[in-house]
Amino acid sequence: MASAILASLFHPSEVLALVQYKLAPKTKYNYSNDKARERLYYHLNMTSRSFAAVIQDLDEELKDAICLFYLVLRGLDTIEDDMTIDLETKIPYLKTFHEIIYQKGWTFTKNGPNEKDRQLLVEFDVIIEGFLKLKPAYQTIIADITKRMGNGMAHYATAGIHVNTTADYDEYCHYVAGLVGLGLSEMFSACGFESPMVAKRKDLSNSMGLFLQKTNITRDYLEDLRDNRRFWPQEIWGLYAEKMEDLVKPENCDKAKQCLSHMVWNAMGHIKDVLEYLEMIKNPSCFKFCAIPQVMAIATLNMLHTNYKIFTHENIKIRKGETVWLMKESDSIDKVAAIFRLYAREINNKSDPLDPHFVNIGVACGEIEQICVDKYPGSTAELARLQAGVMAGTSGSIITAAVVVAGAIAFKSTFA
Ligand code: D9A
């Protein structure tokens, strides 16, 4: 906690959010009366602590269905990601995973020892038991999406198949993330929490996945390269280097940053759809569930833009304080639109005029501003409130910093 507060020292609205988060009573989700269900949420918390809480805040009708959708996809992803499994073994599992989820008692122990979610597959019989308890409507949606995703993953895992064009890039991201958006939209409409229009707008649902996936792929350049996974499209990196791995060479620093701007610009192309999608979502718990990953993504894209560290450091993340502040602020379309405007301005302000994508990114940021002013006028007041927080912050943080330093000196002189 202390390190998180220090990292957010000059962002008091984040320090405030961290302290509130720390002091807030943690919602205790009690599943003790159902051991199998308790084990399910144990695995959910193991796969992603912060997002697990958001899923558990969903209304009861959808909670288990989305928890299982998440765990089934994490299982499939853990097989696709594992580069210690040879293709002859891997591809049949990817293509039949949509049948495997109906096989009572099925488990998988072929993952390499370092796969983060290996235990999930070792105990996958628990997930299948939960899946088979779901209403048939949700089972059908999950199985259909798992089938299309597994086949798409198998295609791109096949030897010699690479993400060459930006069309390949969109297709690959559709298979591993866009389809998740489509599946969730079908669940939202099927249970009646959202209008049938949500399931119909497959273009917007797809963009919800592509914005998240493209941000992750842009962030994970070095980690993926290390594991011999390549998702940056050659049509983009080929404009800046002979080979994708040449971008890490110090002599290619400028070219690498230009390529990074190109990837950031490409991901920003989905923001208009993301805002239009979120505007359709009326159920408060569904809205937060959908909005939180999207605001995390624009904050991450802002952290990535012009940040050469992605070519030298793995696993760079936004501040803990920033994530807690974003989760607190993502409960209305006006607030979310204000957050996108705030980060679009930061992205535009840090752009390098000598960068070939300076204008493209400037236009994309201008469009976000224009769309929000036109369609979400309430975002202007929210933006002023957020900026007041930030501004008060700047002077506030100097005072806070002074107080902390003074406190430290007083403490040292008294007790040293
Ligand atoms: C999601 Cl059911 C994901 N992915 C995410 C998480 O958000 C999306 C995987 C399974 C499900 C949902 C998500 C959330 C809400 C609405 C969505 C949606 O569409 C309408 O998906 C498009 O990242 C994984 C994909 C991007 C491949 C879809 C958010 C999440 N965040 C992790 C951080 C991370 O980077 O993994 O899982 C976390 O917070 O720990």
Image (spheres, rainbow, N blue to C red):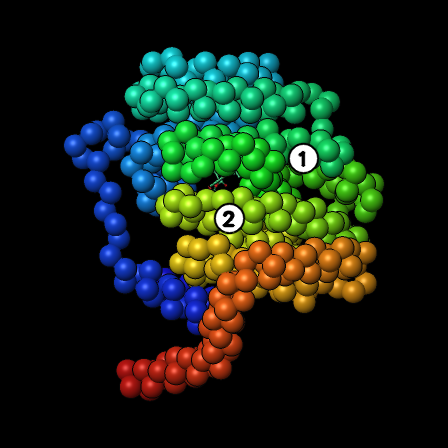
Q: How many residues crowd around disc 2 within 10 Å: few (fewer than 14), some, or many (20 or more)?
A: some
Above or below residue 381? Residue 191 is: above
Above or below residue 396? Residue 63 is: above
Which residue is label 1 attached to? 170
Query: Would residue 325 be seen by someone viewing this image from the given angle?
Result: yes
The amino acid on which the numbered mark 1 sits, given as a three-letter code, is: Asp
The x, y position of residue 26, in whole percent, is 26, 53
Which residue is label 2 attached to? 279
Which marked residue is nearer to the observer: mark 1 or mark 2?
2
Residue at 51% of width from left, 53% of height from top? 295
Residue at 76% of width from left, 55% of height from top? 360
The x, y position of residue 316, in whole percent, is 55, 52
Residue at 33% of width from left, 22% of height from top? 135
355 left or right of 12 in image: right
375 left or right of 32 in image: right
The x, y position of residue 208, in whole percent, is 55, 41
Query: Would residue 49 be seen by someone viewing this image from the given angle?
Result: no
Give whichever of 251, 241 is nearer the camera: 241
